[in-house]
Amino acid sequence: MMTRVSPALGVEVGRPFPLGIKVHNGGVNFAVYSPDAHGIELCLFDEQDNELGRHRLPARTGDIWHGFINGLTPGQRYGYRVHGPFEPFHGLWFNPSKVILDPYAPEISGPIVPNKLMFAHDIHVTGEIVPDEQDNAKHIPKGRIPYNRYFEWSSERPHVNWRETIIYELHPKGFSQTNAALPEDIRGTYLGIAHPESIEHLKRLGITTVELLPCFAFMPEHRISELGLTNYWGYNPALFFAPEPRYAKEDAVVEFKTMVNALHEAGIEVILDVVYNHTAESGMLGPVIANKGLHAREFYRYLDGDYTHYIDNSGCGNSVNSHHPYALKLILDSMRHWMQEYRIDGFRFDLAASLGREKWDFSQESAFFKAILQDPLLSTGKMIAEPWDIGRHGYQLGNFPEQWYECNDKFRDTVRKFWRGDDGVTGDFATRLMGSSDVFHKGATCYSASVNYVCYHDGFTLHDLVSYNSRHNEANKEHNLDGHGNNLSRNYGVEGETQDSKILEIRARQKRNIITTLMMSQGAVHFLGGDEMGRTQNGNNNAYCQDNDISWYQWQKRDAKLEAFTAQVIALRKSSSLFNDLILKDQQGYQSPFSSDEVHWYRADGYAMEIKDWHNPKTKVFGMLLSSDIKNPAVNLHLCDEYYLVLFNASEADINFVLPANPISGWVVLCDTARNDGLLPEEPMLAKGNYDLFAQSVVVLGKAHTN
């Protein structure tokens, strides 16, 4: 659609609210925060990025510049040129040669691509930092006045209970990029996720919630772009309101809504992985895209007022100062925008400890948390914290407010160690299964707010976790020095791919063991998309810069048996609240820190676990009995409507496990990771008395129903 600028544009004072743009009364109101500017020009552009005219915002209310422009039409491109002092050592980067993006822009005209003209400064031969006077207008996308789109929502937010939540983390491009069942022109897009084939895959697995890697408009770093790579993950946001156009076929706004609506129609929630802790403007000598060119001194954190020393709690060059009222408002306005305009269901906050920092340190009672709790809309969303940053006292697992859930790296590490065969982790493993009660004490009932996971986008995929001892990140062009060195992985004899049938069998079984452990754990579940297919990154544990086959889902090579097993175990988890919603009352500390009348622990000889068993570093076999509130399962188990006995064997020896409680009807086998590729036979298998528990396996036994 061609956009035209009326020759009879009228400029009026307008209003200082809302920040950003508002279309009404035949024109558009513009409002932008810039306390140290001397003047701001609104610049209008055609679709070839030719500048059509400039209009000085005529009014200032407090620190907000504003104006109303009559006659602007939908689709009109715009940006700002900001006049004021260029004093980098005082945190002032005003340079009218550079077009600045509106931090509140609801959409942009194209992807943001790194270019040297995005830097507001140049380095003089004397070493002095001076303004760069080259115009960047042709090299940066523009904000865009929204079209008069009417979107018909056909579904409501699903509101999945936390205890039923099974999160599936996916990349908006990589998920569908190679899926031949989709039309080629929508693969790798929001519409690719919305396609019935994609939705059916998620439903078949039993997923309740999709967590999308960042969808804010972002810019790849100059450094990796110069290496011929890109920021595939998108953790380098430039704007907090505009959806990333790289994932759209034509219209990012409509197509993102189409995706959310399609998922909601299927009863699947949508959570956004959001990056509010830093921006793509990097440190002092980074590019100037939006906030830095308008209000850098207020928006970023500095060390004791030294504007040459950006505090970097993110590891990405800067830290957004959520302690400042304007920065906090921008973040909260962005969250409301995504929940109102796009109807998303919640957020997973990257490096969330940064957002909970007041002037310096993290506080559970920070303004950020209080503002969300009191907001009638935001308080209804799911809030998930990555509960750390790299700043002072940055590790805050278990310390977020009551209504927040937290990504539990202790679960990840302990489960990896246990199934790798490490000594001395069994007691900790059992604690993680029970929701990490040593970490989470939320609410009057001390429920678990743990988001349990074993694999995330950063790190090994599940397949690589059982196939590689070491990272193999050579493709990242950093001499294999990037990424985590402590992967807690095991290759079982060969590094990488192999044709050895014995190694392949144990790797496949270990994948099933880890998936089963995840699904039998108390708390919410996070599952890395593609792990159900056996997706590999060829040992790359930091594939943030790999927009290629290393990262894309491998639909043509999918492991159908593993996929079927994953769906089977998810269905088992969803069949009973005992797997995800136990409130442990009267925990019996004298026996172990995680025993109660709802959970009992047993040795392979059928006797109750004792303290000495938990402290024995060679203990790698045990049973977990879940039931309703009973003190003596051997006598009262038959009184329960449902009960389950989960047997774990991380040792390399087969064990004849004496079943500790034997109902008259016996036990029915609901899962055995060592038999038949973990898939259940058509006829139910029954067990009574004892069970042959194979090496490195999990078995789930349940109540046998009789006619």
Image (cartoon, rainbow, N blue to C red):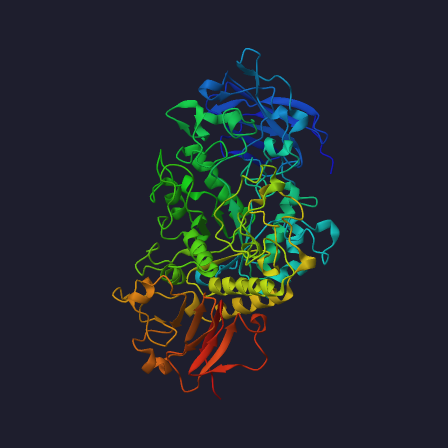
Residue 322, image x, y percentages: 42, 36
Would residue 621 be visible to someone looking at this image? Answer: yes
Residue 649, image x, y percentages: 45, 68
Q: Is residue 491 left or right of residue 421?
A: right
Would residue 113 be visible to someone looking at this image? Answer: no
Residue placed most toward the observer, 242 or 147: 242
| Occupied quadrant, residue 97 | top right
Asked if 497 appears above or below 83 in the picture, the reply is below
Total marks in image: 0
Asked if 50 appears above or below 112 in the picture, the reply is above
| Occupied quadrant, residue 49 | top right
Residue shown at the point (70%, 46%) measured from the top left: 249
In the displayed orientation, state which residue is furthest to the front.
493
Residue 192, image x, y percentages: 67, 53
Q: Is residue 192 left or right of residue 320?
A: right
Residue 1, image x, y percentages: 73, 38
